[in-house]
Image: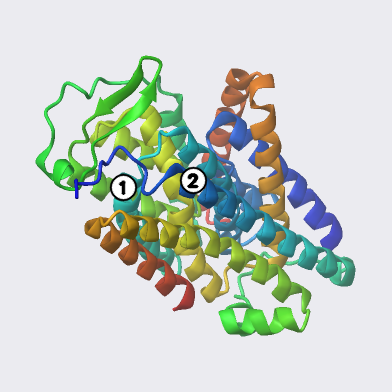
Amino acid sequence: MDTLAFSGIVGAASFCAGFLGSLTGLGGGVVIVPLLTLVFGADIRYAIGASLVSIIATSSGAAAAYVKEGFTNIRIGMLLEIATVIGALVGASLVAIIPANVIAVIFGLVLLQSAYLASRPRSEHATANLPPDPLATRLRLDSTFPTDAGEARYHVRRVPGGFALMWLAGVLSGLLGIGSGAVKVLAMDQVMLMPFKVSTATSNFMIGVTAAASAGIYLRRGYVVPGLAMPVMLGVLAGAMVGARLLFRMPVRQLRILFAVVIVVLALEMIYHGLAGEL
Amino acid sequence: MAAPDSSMPPADPRLQRVVGSLLRFGVLLAAAVVLGGGVAYLAKHGAAIPDYRVFRGQPAELRSLGGIVRGALALDERSVVQLGLVLLIATPIARVAIAGIAFVFERDRTYVLVALLVLALLLKSLLG
């Protein structure tokens, strides 16, 4: 297979990943690394570099739309970016030390966990009745978000716990080249008890910045290959843009299940090949 | 002056719209540069056999900002693709900078410091 055909096939596969990722809200980044390593035989560090770049491309576009809708809490996003960015720098540095097989196994386990988190039923918890948290008040994190019944107030809780989990999300993002949106949402929704929609929107706001932190290190280490990153970035971006346009005309529920199955299969393959020492 | 209300996004909605447009512009500009470099790359090397199986690391001129800019100015295809990727990485960094400026206008000193810290970490990662 020559470079032209290789780029075309990788680009088409990336388009599908971006398309399904944006339709299902699970993000296309999670399947890029398994796809490049398992199907196209790329070294996992090259695959992670290409994946990070595609995550920045899609998240910057999505974040712009979310901020406008009024769900994003920019103060919380900025504050927690300190944690994710430091984590991302740590994760990106670990890639040079941890063997490729171990990265593959960790990748598979995180992928399974993300699929599980995404498949759980989500319910909005009532946070308005909780008393304000002193630290959250001092940092002016409490805010409101639009609901059917007008603007609703929410109080943010357990900031240090959320900060710690965000650090972990950053490490995973830098180590595995994923957006780790699932862990970010977990930190805000479950630990800090923020409304689910605010958590998802703020998570999207943070993903690009987190990925940019590790992408810089990957670029300087020589893990970003132009010939591989080019079809991946263009394919995922185009797929995500088309997906966002068609969002209301597609059977999203079925696609979500299909994509979740794909993720689980890829996760098991990563774990198997990692344990077998074949990556 | 009253304490800034945290329910408001920093500065006014107009600024947010400008930021949104800038982000989209940054991504599209980066994609256009990557596409341009990519087409030239494929025209020149399309018939070669790709090999990304073995990790070698990229040559030094594709790893440093200075090397990438020099290569792109000399119209080396891979450097042009790499320049597009640098523009892409710069897009969220620019957003943090703009959010920081918005906090300056709000006189929210805590979050100006938060934005500066995030910005410093991001620049450290990209520039070394």
Pinpoint the chain carrying mark 1. A
Quadrant location of the C terminus of chain A in the rendered image: bottom right
Amino acid bearing label 2:
Arg
Which residue does the image show at 67% across and 40% down from the upper left? A241
Which residue does the image show at 68% across and 65% down from the upper left? B52
Find disc 2 in the rendering and name its residue.
B14
Find disc 1 in the rendering and name its residue.
A75
Spatial CA distance of label 1 from label 2 is 18 Å
Residue B123 image position (x, y, % from top left): 43, 71
Q: Is residue A102 visible?
A: no
Which residue does the image show at 18% across and 47% down from the upper left? A160
Residue B116 vs residue A209, the one in the foreground: B116
Please, what secondary structure does the residue beneath circle 2 have?
Answer: helix
Instruction: Report the side of A264 relative to A246 (left or right).
Output: left
Which residue does the image show at 10% across and 41% down from the upper left? A134
Label 2 near label 1: C-beta < 8 Å?
A: no
Q: Say few, some or many: other residues with alpha carbon within 10 Å of mark 1 (under 14 / 14 to 19 / 20 or more).
A: many
Quadrant location of the N terminus of chain A in the rendered image: bottom right
Q: Is residue A200 visible?
A: yes
Badges 1 and 2, same chain = no
Q: Where A55 falls versus B127 (above or below)?
A: above
Residue A210 figure quarter = bottom left
Residue A109 image position (x, y, % from top left): 43, 42
Instruction: Report the side of B95 relative to A163 (left or right).
Output: right
Residue B41 image position (x, y, % from top left): 81, 69
Q: Say few, some or many: other residues with alpha carbon within 10 Å of mark 2 (under 14 / 14 to 19 / 20 or more).
A: few
Q: Where A63 falls versus B88 (above or below)?
A: above
Amino acid bearing label 1:
Arg
Q: Where B26 falls versus A26 (above or below)?
A: below
Please, what secondary structure does the residue beneath circle 1 have?
Answer: helix
